[in-house]
C-alpha cells in the first residue's frame, strides 16, 4: 500500500510522484486533496491530487520541497512506501453546466491544482485559456501538457527569463482590458496572488474561484485548524473547501494564519538538514 | 462480615484507602500517569470496606451494570483474574473505564458506604484488577466459528470497539474503518497520556485483533468509501460510531487570530502527533507563557493540564462556578493541584490581537448566577458594564463538539436530528435499512461508558436484524 510507483523531478525542487492507492484513485475527483504522513514520526501534510488513474489505482501528486516533510518525501524512491495516504478529501470542483468559457490562473505550485480540472473541462468541450506564472523559466512546468487542453496558454515570469516579464495579474489585466470575458475564472497559487486576482476580477464582476491552502492536521473537520473566514462565516477548508468563491475570502487572515508555525518548521527542517550533513 | 466491620476502628471503614499519585510539582514536568494505582494489599484493604449490599445500589448507577459487589468480593478473596473476568461480562474496557468514568456521579454516588463516610473506590478497584490482569495474564479468546456474516463499523472509539467485540463473540466477521492513522478515537487523540496511557488503549485493541476483528485505518467514510461500497463488499449491516468530532467555536470577533486553538486541534497535535516531543516528532505546537482555556468540561481540564505540562501558566475561564463544572471532580482537583487557576463567572466577548495577527488578550464580561430553575440548573447572565481585559499568549477553546457531518455525505438519505446528530429508533437503527448508529454521534458529546453501552446494544440489535432477515 502507498507505494511510490512513479517518481520524476519536473523542475528544480519540484517532484511528481505516482502513489499506488486504489481506494483513493477510485473516488478521486478534480479539486480534491490527500493528507499524507511519510514516516511514523512525521507530520500530516495536505497535497492536491494533481491527477489520478482509477484503473491502475494511481494517484499523482506534485510537490515543492519547502520543509522537512516534503524534503524527506523527495528522497524516497520508486518501490518505497509512505506511512499514510488518506483521501480523497475536500469538496470536488463543481462546474456550472451553463458556463462555457474558462480562464485558469496558476501561480507557482498552482499547476497541480488546476491540471485535473482543465483536463475534465476540456473533455467536455469547454473553451479554456490558461495563465501560468513563476519566478523564473525553471519554475514553469507542465507547459506541453497544459497546451493540449486549452486554446491559449499565457506565461509570465518575474524575471522575464521566459514568457512575458511580470506577474500573472499583468496578463490578466491585459486580457480583460482588451475585452476578453470569461464565465468563470479559477485561480490557484500563493495567497497574495489569489488576492490580487480577485481584486481585479471583482471590478469586472467575473465569478472567481480560488483554492485555499491553510495549515491542516486531520483534514476531516475534526481539529478546526484550517478555519478561514468566508463572507461572515467561519468555514473549515478541509471539508467545506478547499475551493471557495474568491470574492468572499478573507485573504489577509489566511496569510497570517499560514505563517504561524514558520519559525518552528524552519527549526525542524534545519535540524533535519544538519543530520543529513552528518551522513545519517 | 458485619461482625468483622464492627470489630475494627470505625474511622477506617469510613475512609477509603488513599491512592498514590505523582506529586504535583513533579508531574507538571512529564506526561506520565498521574494516578499510580493500588497495590494488591491496598486493593484488598479497600475491597474489604464493601458491604456487598443485597440490592447493590451501585449497580444501578452504572450505565452497563457492572456486577460491582461480585467483582469486589473476588478482590477480597485475592482472585484478581476472576474479578477481571467478572467485570468483563458487562464491560469490555475496565482499564479504560476505571480511569476515565465519572464514578462520583454514577456507581460511587449510590454507594451505601457514602452515606456516612466515603463511597467504595469502585473505579480504582476496577482499574486495579484490569492492570493486574494486563500485567500478569495473557488475553485468551476462543474464536467462535464464523457465521459468515460481515458487519462494518465506522470509527474506532469506545462505541465502535465495544460493538465489534460483542459481534466478534457471536461469530461475526467485523471490520472497523477508521479515518485516522491511529485507533481508539478520543481515547487516543483526545484524552492525554497522563490520564489514560496509550499503552492501555493499544492493549485493548490488540485483544480485539486477537478476537479476529479487522482494522482498516486511513479510511474516511463519506470520502474514501461509502455505503454502496460496503454493500458491494458484502457487509450486511453497518454501525456508525464516528463521534462528535467537529469543534464548536464561540463565534466572536477575533477568533481567527493566531494562537487560538480549538481543544481538538491542541490535543490532537499533542496526543496523536506527539507535538510535545517536537522536533523528534515533526508536528509543532506553540504555546506562550500564559494560556487561557475557555470551558469547564473534561476537555477543558485536559487541554489546561496539557498546556501546563508544556510549561505555561494556565487559567480556566468558565461561565458558571466551579460547582457547576461538568468535568470530573478528580480532574478539577488534579488541575488545581497542578497550579491551574480557575476564573469563575466570566464569559468571552472578543479576542484582541497585535499587528502580526497574533492574539494578545480576551475581553471578558462577568456573569451572575440566577436561582436554580425547575430543572435544578442555574443559568447565568452577564453583568452590564463589568467587562475587563484578560491578557494571555494563547487561548484554547473547549466549549464542546458537534457531530461530524461527513457521514451524512456518505448516506444522503440519513435522517438527522436538528442539532446534526443521527436519529435512531429504540433499536439504535437509523431510518436507513441495516444502518445502526451509537455513541457521541447520536447522543452528542457524552461519556466513554455510554458510548460503550450503545455499542453493545447496537450489536445485539444488529444480530437480531441479520438473523431475522
Ligand atoms: C489543500 C492543500 C493542497 C496543497 N497542495 C499542494 C500541492 O499540490 N503541492 C505542493 O507543493 N504543496 C501543496 N500544498 C502545500 C503543502 O501542504 C505544504 O507545502 C506542506 O505542508 C509543507 O510541508 P513541509 O513539512 O515540507 O514543510 P513545513 O516545514 O511544514 O513548512 C515549510 C513552510 O511551508 C509553508 N507551509 C506549511 N504548511 C503549509 C500549508 N498547509 N499550505 C501552504 N504552505 C504551507 C509554510 O510557509 C512553512 O513555513 C497544499 C496545501 C493545502 C492545504
Ligand atoms: C479531551 C476529552 C476528554 C474526555 N474525557 C472523558 C472522561 O474523562 N470520561 C468520559 O467518560 N468521557 C470523556 N470524554 C468523552 C468520551 O471520550 C466520548 O464520549 C467517547 O469517546 C465517545 O465515543 P465514540 O465511540 O462515540 O466516538 P469517538 O471516541 O469520538 O470515536 C469516533 C471515531 O470515529 C472516527 N471517525 C469519525 N468520522 C469518521 C469517518 N467519516 N470515517 C471513519 N472514521 C471516522 C474518528 O476518527 C474517531 O476515531 C472526553 C472527550 C474528550 C474529547
Ligand atoms: S453500594 Fe457500595 S458497599 Fe454496597 S455493594 Fe455497592 S460498592 Fe459495595
Ligand atoms: S484540517 Fe482539521 S478541521 Fe480541517
Image: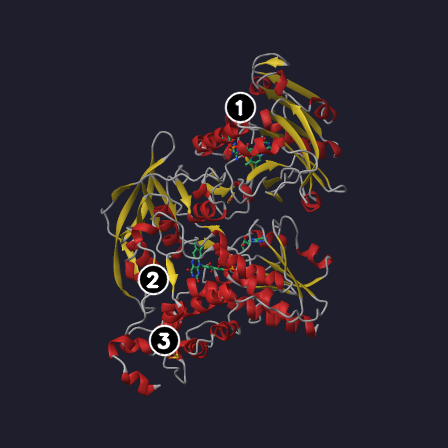
Dot 2 or dot 3: first in sequence order is: 2
Q: Position of residue B96 (x, y in %)?
A: 47, 63
- Which label sits on residue B20? 2
| Residue at which label 1 appears | A200
In the image, taking residue A249 as reference, residue B387 lies left or right, namely left
Report in which chain the residue with disc 3 lies: B
Q: Is residue B71 above or below residue A126?
A: below
Report in which chain the residue with disc 2 lies: B
Report in which chain the residue with disc 1 lies: A
Cα separation between marks 2 and 1: 67 Å
Q: Position of residue B42 (x, y in %)?
A: 36, 70
Which residue is most to the bottom? B3
Cα separation between marks 3 and 1: 69 Å
Between disc 2 and disc 1, the foreground one is: 2
Instruction: Kindly indicate whether the residues beneath marks 3 and 1 are on one polypeptide chain.
Output: no
Q: Secondary structure at mark 2?
A: strand
Q: Is residue B441 above or below residue A169?
A: below
For the image, the number of numbered tags is 3
Between disc 3 and disc 1, the foreground one is: 3
The reply to whether the residue tagged 3 has its Cβ within 8 angstroms of ligand 3 is yes
Residue drawn at point x = 61 percent, y = 69 percent: B141
In the image, taking residue B393 as reference, residue A240 lies left or right, namely right
Q: Do the residues bearing badges 3 and 1 touch, measured as CB atoms within 8 Å? A: no
Q: Is residue A84 above or below residue B15?
A: above
Between disc 2 and disc 3, the foreground one is: 2
Amino acid at each position: 500500500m502507498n507505494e511510490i510507483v512513479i517518481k520524476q523531478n519536473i523542475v528544480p525542487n519540484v517532484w511528481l510522484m505516482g502513489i499506488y492507492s486504489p481506494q483513493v484513485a477510485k473516488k478521486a475527483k478534480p479539486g480534491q486533496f490527500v493528507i499524507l504522513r511519510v514516516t511514523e514520526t512525521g507530520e500530516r501534510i495536505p497535497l492536491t491530487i494533481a491527477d489520478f488513474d482509477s484503473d491502475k489505482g494511481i494517484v499523482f501528486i506534485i510537490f515543492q520541497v519547502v520543509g522537512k516533510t516534503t524534503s524527506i518525501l523527495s528522497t524516497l524512491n520508486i518501490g518505497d512506501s509512505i506511512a499514510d495516504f488518506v483521501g480523497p478529501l475536500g469538496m470536488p470542483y463543481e462546474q456550472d453546466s451553463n458556463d462555457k468559457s474558462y480562464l485558469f490562473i496558476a501561480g507557482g505550485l498552482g499547476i497541480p491544482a488546476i491540471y485535473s480540472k482543465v483536463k475534465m473541462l476540456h473533455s467536455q468541450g469547454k473553451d479554456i485559456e490558461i495563465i501560468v506564472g513563476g519566478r523564473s523559466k525553471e519554475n514553469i512546468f507542465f507547459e506541453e501538457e497544459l497546451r493540449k487542453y486549452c486554446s491559449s496558454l499565457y506565461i509570465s515570469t518575474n524575471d522575464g527569463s521566459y514568457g512575458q516579464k511580470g506577474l500573472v495579474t499583468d496578463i490578466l489585466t491585459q486580457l480583460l482590458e482588451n475585452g476578453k470575458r470569461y464565465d468563470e475564472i479559477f485561480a490557484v497559487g500563493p495567497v497574495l496572488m489569489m488576492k490580487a486576482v480577485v481584486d481585479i476580477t471583482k471590478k469586472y464582476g467575473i465569478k472567481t474561484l480560488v483554492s485555499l491552502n491553510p495549515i491542516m492536521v486531520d483534514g476531516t473537520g475534526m481539529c478546526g485548524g484550517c478555519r478561514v473566514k468566508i463572507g461572515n462565516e467561519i468555514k473549515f477548508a478541509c471539508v467545506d473547501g478547499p475551493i471557495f468563491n474568491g470574492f468572499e475570502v478573507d485573504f489577509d487572515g489566511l496569510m497570517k494564519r499560514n505563517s504561524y508555525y514558520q519559525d518552528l518548521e524552519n527549526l525542524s527542517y534545519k535540524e533535519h538538514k544538519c543530520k543529513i550533513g552528518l551522513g545519517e | 462480615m458485619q461482625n468483622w466491620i464492627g470489630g475494627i476502628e470505625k474511622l477506617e471503614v469510613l475512609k477509603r484507602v488513599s491512592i498514590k499519585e505523582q506529586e504535583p510539582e513533579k508531574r507538571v514536568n512529564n506526561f506520565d500517569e498521574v494516578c499510580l494505582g493500588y497495590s494488591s494489599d491496598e486493593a484488598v484493604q479497600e475491597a474489604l470496606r464493601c458491604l456487598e449490599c443485597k440490592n447493590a445500589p451501585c449497580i444501578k448507577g452504572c450505565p452497563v451494570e457492572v456486577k460491582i459487589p461480585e467483582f469486589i468480593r473476588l478482590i477480597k478473596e485475592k482472585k484478581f483474574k476472576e474479578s477481571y473476568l467478572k467485570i468483563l461480562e458487562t464491560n469490555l474496557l475496565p482499564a479504560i473505564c476505571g480511569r476515565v468514568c465519572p464514578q462520583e456521579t454514577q456507581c460511587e454516588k449510590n454507594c451505601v458506604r457514602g452515606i456516612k463516610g466515603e463511597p467504595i473506590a469502585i473505579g480504582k478497584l476496577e482499574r486495579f484488577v484490569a492492570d493486574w490482569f494486563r500485567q500478569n495474564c495473557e488475553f485468551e479468546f476462543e474464536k467462535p466459528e464464523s457465521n459468515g456474516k460481515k458487519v462494518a463499523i465506522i470509527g474506532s472509539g469506545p462505541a465502535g470497539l465495544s460493538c465489534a467485540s460483542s459481534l466478534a463473540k457471536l461469530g461475526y466477521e467485523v471490520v472497523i474503518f477508521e479515518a485516522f492513522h491511529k485507533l481508539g478515537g478520543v481515547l487516543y487523540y483526545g484524552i492525554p497520556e497522563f490520564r489514560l496511557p496509550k499503552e492501555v488503549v493499544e492493549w485493548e485493541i490488540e485483544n480485539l485483533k486477537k478476537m479476529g476483528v479487522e482494522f482498516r485505518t486511513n479510511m474516511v467514510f463519506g470520502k474514501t468509501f461509502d455505503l454502496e461500497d460496503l454493500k458491494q463488499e458484502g457487509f450486511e449491516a453497518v454501525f456508525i460510531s464516528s463521534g462528535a468530532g467537529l469543534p464548536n467555536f464561540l463565534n466572536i470577533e477575533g477568533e481567527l487570530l493566531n494562537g487560538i486553538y480549538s481543544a481538538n486541534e491542541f490535543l490532537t497535535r499533542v496526543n496523536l502527533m506527539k507535538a510535545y516531543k517536537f522536533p523528534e516528532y515533526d508536528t509543532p505546537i506553540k504555546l506562550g507563557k500564559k494560556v487561557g482555556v475557555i470551558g469547564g468540561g473534561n476537555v477543558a481540564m485536559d487541554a489546561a493540564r496539557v498546556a501546563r505540562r508544556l510549561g505555561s501558566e494556565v487559567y480556566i475561564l468558565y461561565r458558571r462556578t466551579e460547582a457547576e463544572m461538568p468535568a470530573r471532580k478528580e480532574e478539577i482537583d488534579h488541575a488545581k493541584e497542578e497550579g491551574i487557576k480557575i476564573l469563575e463567572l466570566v464569559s468571552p466577548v472578543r479576542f484582541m490581537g497585535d499587528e502580526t495577527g497574533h492574539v494578545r488578550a480576551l475581553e471578558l464580561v462577568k456573569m451572575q448566577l440566577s436561582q436554580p430553575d425547575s430543572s435544578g440548573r442555574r443559568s447565568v447572565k452577564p453583568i452590564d458594564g463589568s467587562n475587563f481585559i484578560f491578557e494571555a499568549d494563547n487561548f484554547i477553546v473547549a466549549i464542546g463538539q458537534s457531530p461530524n457531518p461527513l457521514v451524512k455525505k456518505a448516506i444522503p438519505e440519513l435522517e438527522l436530528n436538528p442539532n446534526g446528530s443521527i436519529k435512531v429508533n429504540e433499536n439504535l437503527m437509523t431510518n436507513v435499512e441495516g444502518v445502526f448508529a451509537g455513541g457521541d454521534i447520536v447522543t452528542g458529546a457524552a461519556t466513554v461508558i455510554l458510548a460503550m453501552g450503545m455499542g453493545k446494544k447496537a450489536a445485539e440489535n444488529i444480530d437480531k436484524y441479520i438473523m431475522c432477515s
